Image (tube, rainbow, N blue to C red):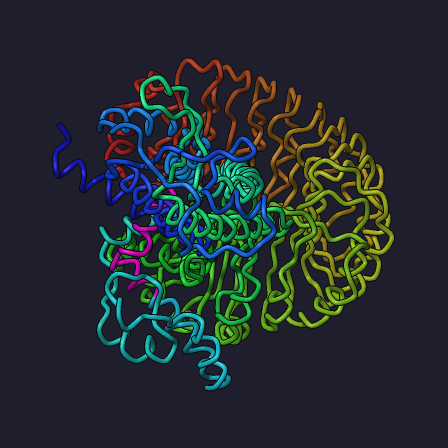
Amino acid sequence: MITLTELKCLADAQSSYHILKPWWDVFWYYITLIMLLVAVLAGALQLTQSRVLCCLPCKVEFDNHCAVPWDILKASVNVSFDPGTPLPFPLRIQNDLHRQQYSYIDAVCYEKQLHWFAKFFPYLVLLHTLIFAACSNFWLHYPSTSSRLEHFVAILHKCFDSPWTTRALSETVAEQSGRTLTLSKSKVLLSSSGCTADIDSSKQSLPYPQSGLESAGIESSTSSVLDKKEGEQAKAIFEKVKRFRMHVEQKDIIYRVYLKQIIVKVILFVLIITYVPYFLSYITLEIDCSVDVQAFTGYKRYQCVYSLAEIFKVLASFYVILVLLYGLTSSYSLWWMLRSSLKQYSFEALREKSNYSDIPDVRNDFAFILHLADQYDPLYSKRFSIFLSEVSENKLKQINLNNEWTVEKLKSKLVKNSQDKVELHLFMLNGLPDNVFELTEIEVLSLELIPEVKLPSTISQLVNLKELHVYHSSLVIDHPALAFLEENLKILRLKFTEMGKIPRWLFHLKNLKELYLSGCVLPEQLSTMQMEGFQDLKNLRTLYLKSSLSRIPQVVTDLLPSLQKLSLDNEGSKLVVLNNLKKMVNLKCLELISCDLERIPHSIFSLNNLHELNLKENNLKTVEEIISFQHLQNLSCLKLWHNNIAYIPAQIGALSNLEQLFLDHNNIENLPLQLFLCTKLYYLDLSYNHLTFIPEEIQYLSNLQYFAVTNNNIEILPDGLFQCKKLQCLLLGKNSLMSLSPHVGELSNLTHLEVIGNYLEMLPPELEGCQSLKRSCLIVEENLLNTLPLPVTERLQTCLDKC
């Protein structure tokens, strides 16, 4: 037993498919309904007639046919005959026929003499109508199509009937229409005209927003910002639309099923229109019937009258007209189906009329469904295009983002970085929360793995912002925001995933001082526009490039001659051409990292203003060219770390102005005595080498403050090391020391001591003389602390200061 609730659900399911029925589907429905009425009417007439055939005996036969007497006279005598003239022989009935005999004759004549088309006409109409109806609804119930159609209709209803989606989209259009209004009022009216059909009658149920002027005025005053729950629901709908589109766009099952059922209709139409008009002539009023019952009635031929002949002829003619209309409509729909444009649905016209310029074209079954919806009501496809537009989706994402990232939550993310600057680091978000621009204390804004970032004009509220980091993110900047960054931004760090992509807005940052580019190729293939753009960065002083280049880009050496620091991390690729470095005469710091250099480039020796040279992680095995560094009178920092250097040439003593020397992570076994002629050295790092001893001449480095020989093979320390009274940091870990000299107590300025990983059995009590040494900066095994006198241990334990 089917309940009323189930019937209502079934009716609702059927009515929900109306949006997928174009005008010809509706026309088919009404024609099918009329055909059904024709069949019912013809059947009812046939069933209600007690005597479909009315037969009378034939008293006169002529030419083996039943004929009236005057027909015989006209045939035999070529004279005119007046029907009112008395017959030459009277009509007489030989016997009275009973009612049963007439009924028998009527039935026999009906079965044997009446044409099958006249008998079964109502049933043929009913059968044709049922086939047509089945073809019209087959695709809505076919397993491979019905689920997709039901899913589409469900999504469409959720999109259209959600008030929270209506508000969100109204805000989107209001914002875009407001921008257009600043250009031209008439243009706003034109772009909004395609979005306002029947909006007055369905403001609450239809999510397609009002026109730009109405939205900007009315909607801004009445609609509130979506709350968190509504925003999540909106996000879920967009995800459903995306998943449905990805799934349906790959196939054309719905298209093929719909095409097949139309082909069946066309074939059926051709068959019906071929045989029905032909057999229509067999529906006659008079029927000559021969029944061999003369022994009972005295007659063997009868003249019958088909009482439904005339009305059946009318109904059949009307039915033929209906089939003709049905067939023509089916032929049109077949032509519509075979058009190549049905494989793709283009929103080109809508893009021209509206503000949504990013609406994508769709293909296959999704395109076909939208074609059907467009034939039913063009407004449906226009509304649904909103959900394919990234503009509206991004707007809802932004609303969700703002609800999730409140001002309080963002404030909790503020930290002080190593440069003691207030930094906000946002990682893997859907966008940039608007509440960020309420935190005016931000000095460094770091955005990482955020697919789409848009900097609006409100960034001007960040008056302290000087540094921007953009890592693997796509950044779009409004013109007012760009003007603000042009004046205030000093440091920019960009890391790209796509090769060769340099944002054009970068070249507008006139006051930029430091630029860090990672993953971005800057070879000779740079366009003229980009070369000219770098020339506009007149205040740029530091440039960091991390990529794989064969030579230093010409744009750097030719257009940035005032550059003071150049850092190139070539990620292990060999840097071949370095001659153009000579042009950078103002360079003070040069870093050639991971460039696979085997020798120190001679072009470096022309940089007279160079203060620091960093050749980290190359393939240097010898540094014989170090003698040429004496021409660089300003060179104070030399970093040759992380190479394969086996020895240091004696000529290093000529670098009298050297203050910092990094030789760690090499293969050095001995130190030349000339090294200690560099009396200005205050930083010397010899860690991770193969040293076995330290010369006594180290005492001449009177300015030494940092000395590291971690991870070597040193067995004993020279007493001269403890004559370096300015020593603050002494790193002796992971060596072969058996003891620590008592002279260590003479280093009164020592703040950091590392001796872990040696063979020490005790610590000298003279450590008490190192008054600046803190427990947290004494790196040693715990058991060795017990070897110190108790006063020394207590002093170290009670001091909580950090090194």
Q: Quadrant of residue 693?
A: top right
Residue 640, position in %: x, y? 70, 38
Residue at 65% x, 53% y: name it. 544
Residue at 38% x, 26% y: name it. 299
Residue at 49% x, 76% y: name it. 480
Q: Quadrant of the N terminus?
A: top left
Q: Tell which of 208 and 526 is nearer to you.
A: 208
Task: Tell me the magenta residue range.
Answer: 151-169
Q: Quadrant of the C terminus?
A: top left
Residue 469, position in %: x, y? 50, 55
Q: Work out whether 763 lies above or below 192.
A: above
Residue 450, position in %: x, y? 46, 50
Residue at 46% x, 65% y: name it. 455
Question: Could one spot residue 51 in this view of the protein?
Answer: yes
Q: Is residue 663 left or right of residue 414?
A: right
Q: Residue furthest front?
A: 88
Residue 452, position in %: x, y? 48, 54
Q: Work out whether 108 lies above or below 504.
A: above
Q: Tell which of 564 and 199 is nearer to you.
A: 199
Q: Work out whether 731 lies above or below 227.
A: above
Q: Please, what is the dominant secondary structure of the magenta stretch?
A: helix
